[in-house]
């Protein structure tokens, strides 16, 4: 019981404290790839600290929805950190839901943030909200079908079960159809976390942005919370990708040494994914908004192929 | 006097709710009054499935009638039709023979027809009622044909006798009966492409009637479909289940696509009802397929998911329609482009509508999420049927359901955000006032029901599994977890909405406390929304509902077939001065263009041909009668 609680706290701490670093590392790597020195990977922490100390300006147009949203957003992300296998295969809240719950928790975050965007009453907020929900809605089928592809091979949809099964039978994870599901899921991750080529997290150019337009009215501690939640979203998605498709190193035991080893393995896997993301974001340009559905349709086709491969090639 | 109708309906609802719950608990009975109705007599049977739907009618009639007490609409109009409507809906699930069923069914349709005709001076209302009458009677014709054929083949109008005799009938005969019955019931349920009456009729009625129509009347179509496909006609061939599953997938995706681009708040809700019936049918179709394949545990799971979504949709759609009714009452318009800012003027209505929107968007830990989760879990186990064609059908259902839930989330961000948030878009919205306490009571009760149905999932699911078991004739208990956790199919999937809610609550409090302890800046400075340097913010700078839905309109333009109409009037002296610009961007309904218009045209052509034998002379008509008589005698 105590161990489970400690693990749960540890998961939240790792996700909450590690998320800004992950974002910082991607930024630094991108800067280096572009030939700039760039800020230190620890810069996001300084940004958060500065924002937390500032008094927020809140539009008189807005209602309580706008003020409650940052807290709800952070809460959903913290709960996802309890469900996803960050340190151990079966975290404390793993029984409460599975990967479908996870996707709907992300959707809860999108829902409430889009409402906050509309609440500001500016065209930017509405524009961002409209685009964000469009991308999220079109990404949804890919996520579920990719999940289905993985669940088919592991014969369960409980995240812990999938991780343990794939760790036990590495051949399952090496299946080419599994790779298809991984690629599909990776594309969806780019869309869901607002990365290139779907959305550019580094720009404030009104006409191209999605996520940044939606949160334009936030400032002070509210902006800090929203930014922290976005970072956690990236962290949780990447952890999911890392531990679900490459489950080596994730332990089923709640003991100090395996958990620490698991943490190291996770750090390594996340570093690789972050580097891949940085390279990808450096070499591709942002897609026009109305080309994004084609990208998502492509990822859906990959996920569907991965599923049909199971039916046709048992 | 005006309150008499709702009060009677309230009493009927209360009795129905209690009786229905008794039926779900296994307290079954039969009443037969042979002399009351011709051709078989009145016969009512309460079994668990009938009890569930009876409780549903009662459970929705209660808040809807309470809401009606608070509305100050035209007194007297519909005072008789409303209680008759509620009473006939109570009889439909209880009916145990053809005559009782058809009479209750027709009474329900007629009563709702008069309620749809509420604003009988308005052309749109009259047209809605007309389309509704035509479609519902076409459905009735199918139902009657199916039921009379079954009666002829089995030699009995009683449903209990069909149950016994059906397995002995040929597969072709049963399929004919299934197609006829399913078409009739699907028309009432609003399954695409038989849905055309629904978005016209539901918004035209007063809001508490819209709530009843969307919340329960269309569910009685689902009830009939479940009865026909699983009970009356026995276990059918796999294509019945495939047809129901695919019809559900198509209805859910297309229903939500239409809801997304509609800016009439009540019509949006009506289209969303089509979507939710689709989700229910996905579960029902999966249940039929599993039942046919002999996987009883999975069949029960899928059917329980369908029944759960039936209840959930009744809860949140009633809530949303009542909320929309309060908004329409306050602003005098159904057009969302004229709303906005209502959250400050109608805080109670807004909070209840938000709960309903989150529930219908299937956000955890509310009730819509639980039933969609159950449906997904049931669908995801389809590989236990080893037939690639069926597996692909299931996969289509999974993808369709996922797309639907994403689009529904977008749709209800729009429905809530445009209606209630930001600045009011019209003077009427700026002057809006909160609904009277009676109306608020009804809405708050339904919002509480949405939360309770989500958190109490572990209590609801076992009851629904036993109802489904009574329907498929499977009495072996199925494990669905303990009080805290829903665990289905031996650990394939587990869910605990209670634990999620507790964790969300704790996670909500954590940053608040942490920020206090860390000494973050408190307070906030009120100021205007940033407007790129403009001094004054007006509602014209806000994103409109049309603009919000535009990405979807573009992505799915092959389906919406939008048209662009631009009409500019220049100044007669100089073309540089524009006097008036009119821009419209309507979508076209492919069902009207490609299905109903050709069908109606063909009907017209046939009718014109038939006019040739209509001379208007009585003698000729007498000759026709004589000829028909002789022909019949010869044939007999």
Image: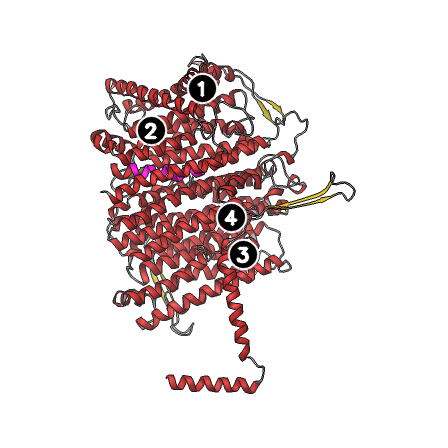
Q: Position of residue B112 (x, y in %)?
A: 52, 60
The residue that appears at 42% across and 72% down in the rendered structure is: B37
Residue under numbered circle 3? B201
Q: Would you name the residue on which mark 4 appears?
A: B560
Q: Chain of mark 4?
A: B
Q: Earlier in the sequence, mark 3 or mark 1?
A: 3
Cα–Cα span, label 4 and label 1: 49 Å
Q: Are marks 2 and 4 on the same chain?
A: no
Sequence-first tag of 4 and 3: 3
SS of the residue under disc 1: helix
Can residue B310 be seen in the rendering of this structure? no
Regarding residue B228, the answer to whether it shows in the image is yes
Residue placed furthest toward the right: B573
**Which residue does the numbered mark 1 point to in the structure image?**
B514
B24 w.r.t. A250: above or below = below
First of labels 4, 1 by sequence position: 1
**Image position of A105 (left or right of B117):** left
Is B407 left or right of B380, judged from the image as shown? right
Give the label, 3 or 1, closer to the camera. 3
- In which quadrant is the C terminus of chain A drawn? top left
Q: Which residue is mark 2?
A: A241
- What whole-number distance in Å separates the C-alpha atoms at marks 2 and 4? 36 Å
Circle 2: element type: helix
In the picture shown, does residue B633 fall above or below B274?
below
Alpha-carbon distance for marks 2 and 1? 30 Å
* Quarter occupied by the N terminus of chain A: top left
**Label 1 near label 2: C-beta < 8 Å?**
no
């Amino acid at each position: 019981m105590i161990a489970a609680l400690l693990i749960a706290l540890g998961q939240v701490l790792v996700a909450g404290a590690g998320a800004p670093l992950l974002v910082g590392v991607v930024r630094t790597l991108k800067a280096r790839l572009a030939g700039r020195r760039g800020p230190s990977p620890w810069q996001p922490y300084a940004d958060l600290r500065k924002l937390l100390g500032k008094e927020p300006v809140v539009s008189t147009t807005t209602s309580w929805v706008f003020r409650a949203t940052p807290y709800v957003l952070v809460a959903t992300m913290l709960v996802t950190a309890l469900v996803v296998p960050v340190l151990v295969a079966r975290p404390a809240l793993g029984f409460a839901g599975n990967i479908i719950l996870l996707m709907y928790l992300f959707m809860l975050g999108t829902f409430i943030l889009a409402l906050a965007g509309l609440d500001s009453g500016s065209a930017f907020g509405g524009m961002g909200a409209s685009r964000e929900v469009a991308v999220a809605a079109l990404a949804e089928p890919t996520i579920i079908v990719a999940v289905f592809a993985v669940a088919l091979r592991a014969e369960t949809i409980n995240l812990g079960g999938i991780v343990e099964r794939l760790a036990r039978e590495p051949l399952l994870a090496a299946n080419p159809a599994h790779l298809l599901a991984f690629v599909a899921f990776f594309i969806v991750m780019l869309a869901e976390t607002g990365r290139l080529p779907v959305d550019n997290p580094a720009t404030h150019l009104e006409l191209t942005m999605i996520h940044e337009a939606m949160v334009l009215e936030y400032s002070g501690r509210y902006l800090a919370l929203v930014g922290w939640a976005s970072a956690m979203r990236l962290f949780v998605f990447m952890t999911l990708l890392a531990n679900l498709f490459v489950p080596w190193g994730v332990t089923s035991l709640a003991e100090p040494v395996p958990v620490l080893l698991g943490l190291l393995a996770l750090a390594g896997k996340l570093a690789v994914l972050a580097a891949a993301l940085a390279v990808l974001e450096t070499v591709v340009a942002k897609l026009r908004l109305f080309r994004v559905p084609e990208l998502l349709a492509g990822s859906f086709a990959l996920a569907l192929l991965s599923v049909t491969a199971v039916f046709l090639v048992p | 006097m005006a309150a008499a109708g709702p009060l009677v309906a309230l009493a009927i609802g209360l009795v129905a709710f209690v009786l229905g719950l008794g039926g779900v608990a296994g307290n079954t009975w039969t009443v037969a009054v042979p002399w009351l109705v011709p051709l078989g007599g009145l016969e009512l049977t309460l079994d668990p499935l009938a009890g569930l739907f009876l409780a549903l009618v009662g459970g929705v009639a209660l808040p809807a009638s309470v809401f009606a007490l608070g509305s100050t609409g035209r007194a007297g109009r519909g005072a008789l039709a409303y209680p008759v409507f509620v009473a006939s809906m109570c009889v439909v699930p209880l009916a145990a023979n053809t005559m009782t069923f058809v009479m209750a069914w027709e009474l329900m349709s007629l009563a709702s027809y008069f309620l749809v005709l509420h604003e009988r001076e308005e052309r749109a209302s009259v047209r809605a009622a007309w389309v509704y009458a035509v479609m519902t009677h076409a459905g009735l014709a199918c139902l009657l044909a199916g039921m009379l054929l079954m009666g002829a083949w089995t030699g009995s109008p009683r449903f209990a006798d069909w149950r016994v005799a059906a397995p002995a009938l040929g597969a072709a005969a049963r399929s004919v009966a299934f197609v006829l019955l399913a078409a009739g019931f699907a028309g009432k349920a609003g399954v695409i492409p038989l849905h055309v009456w629904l978005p016209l009729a539901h918004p035209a009625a007063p809001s508490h009637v819209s709530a009843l129509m969307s919340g329960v009347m269309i569910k009685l179509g689902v009830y009939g479909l479940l009865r026909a496909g699983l009970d009356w006609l026995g276990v059918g061939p796999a294509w019945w289940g495939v047809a129901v599953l695919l019809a559900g997938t198509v209805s859910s995706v297309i229903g939500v696509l239409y809801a997304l681009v509609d800016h009439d708040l009540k019509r949006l809700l009506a289209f969303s009802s089509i979507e939710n019936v689709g989700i229910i049918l996905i579960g029902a179709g999966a249940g039929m397929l599993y039942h046919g394949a002999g996987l009883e545990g999975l069949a029960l799971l899928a059917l329980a998911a369908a029944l759960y979504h039936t209840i959930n949709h009744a809860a949140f759609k009633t809530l949303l329609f009542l909320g929309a009714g309060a908004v329409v009452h306050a602003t005098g318009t159904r057009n969302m482009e004229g709303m906005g800012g209502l959250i400050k003027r109608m805080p109670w209505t807004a909070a209840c509508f938000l709960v309903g929107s989150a529930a219908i968007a299937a956000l955890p830990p509310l009730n819509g999420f639980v039933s969609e989760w159950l449906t997904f879990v049931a669908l995801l186990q389809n590989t236990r049927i080893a037939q690639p064609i069926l597996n692909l059908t299931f996969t289509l259902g999974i993808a369709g359901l996922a797309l639907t839930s994403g689009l529904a989330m977008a749709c209800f961000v729009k429905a809530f955000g445009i209606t209630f948030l930001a600045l009011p878009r019209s003077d009427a919205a700026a002057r809006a006032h909160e609904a009277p306490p009676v109306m608020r009571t009804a809405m708050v009760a339904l919002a509480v029901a949405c939360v309770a149905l989500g958190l109490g999932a572990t209590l609801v699911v076992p009851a629904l599994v036993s109802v489904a078991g009574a329907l498929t004739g499977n009495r072996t208990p199925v494990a669905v977890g303990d009080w805290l956790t829903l665990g289905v199919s031996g650990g394939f999937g587990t869910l605990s909405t209670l634990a999620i809610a507790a964790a969300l609550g704790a996670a909500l409090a954590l940053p608040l406390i942490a920020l206090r302890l860390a000494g973050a800046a408190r307070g906030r400075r009120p100021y205007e929304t940033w407007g790129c340097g403009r001094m004054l913010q007006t509602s014209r700078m806000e994103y409109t509902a049309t603009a919000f839905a535009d990405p979807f309109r573009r992505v799915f333009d092959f389906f919406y077939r939008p048209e662009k109409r631009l009409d500019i009037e220049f100044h007669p002296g100089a073309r540089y001065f524009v006097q008036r610009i009119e821009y419209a961007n309507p979508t076209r309904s492919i069902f009207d263009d490609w299905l109903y218009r050709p069908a109606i045209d063909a009907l017209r052509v046939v009718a014109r041909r038939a006019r040739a034998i209509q001379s208007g002379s009585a003698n000729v008509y007498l000759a026709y009668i004589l000829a028909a008589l002789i022909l019949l005698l010869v044939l007999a």
